[in-house]
Amino acid sequence: MYTGRLMTVFITMLLGLSCASSQNRVSLSLPGKTFLVSKPFTVTVKNETSKSVAFCSDFGAKTAEGIATSPDFELIRKHGQQWISQVGDDVGHILAPDSLAASESKSYKVQLSHPGTYRFILHYRVGESADLNCAKQSLLKARARSIVFTVSTVAGGAR
């Protein structure tokens, strides 16, 4: 009987720790695992922490609908067994601090022009965005990663 209660307490503690750790992060979610080249899809950034989080956003990206705002995601592409950061053309883009309140989420439209296997990474910090220096965003240690996804030239994933 004593062992049964001890086991119940132990399992309850483990469940509590796993729930606490899973709700203390920022997540990136996608509506699927395969997308078409040059067709927009959404990336949702969700703050699952109990505090606001800050990151840098691009307020100068131009789309057919006008000026778009999206987080300054790091895009990595799989080449063989390695993941390589894809550096884009930032001319004309304006990086500025952005934030999400506790338990808030925002969705952003993105599109990629080349087929391949990718993953998004968002660098962020817990806290307000007021003093965030986007020129030094590489100093942001916390990272949220999307699932691995494929961008194809034809529907169904074949390239």
Image (spheres, helix red, strand yellow):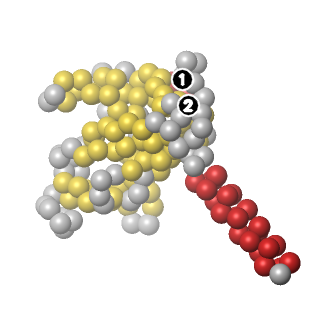
At 46% across and 26% down in the image, what residue appears? Answer: 98
Q: Position of residue 77 (x, y in %)?
A: 37, 54
Q: Is residue 47 above or below residue 23?
A: above
Q: Secondary structure at mark 1?
A: loop
Q: Is residue 129 visible?
A: yes
Cα separation between marks 2 and 1? 9 Å
Q: Secondary structure at mark 2?
A: loop
Q: Residue at x 45, y 61 (%)?
A: 82
Three-letter code, disc 1: Ser
Mark toward the start of the polypeptide (2 vs 1): 2
Residue 52 is marked as 2
Judged from this view, the residue extending furthest toward the front is: 1
- Where 55 sits versus 12, above or below? above
**Image-quadrant location for residue 62:** top left
- Measured along the vertical axis of the image, is residue 138 above or below residue 85? above
Which residue is labeled 1 in the image? 129
Q: Where is the N terminus found, in terms of image quarters?
A: bottom right
Mark 1 and mark 2 in contact (Cβ < 8 Å)? yes
Quadrant containing the C terminus is: bottom left
- Residue 49, given in percent of the width and then of the height, sits at 57, 41
Which disc is residue 155 wearing?
A: none
Identify the residue at image location x=39%, y=59%. Answer: 148
Dot 2 alpha-carbon crowd within 10 angstroms: few under 14, some 14 to 19, many 20 or more: some
* Res. 138 in view: no
From the viewer's side, name the closer residue of 154 and 82: 154
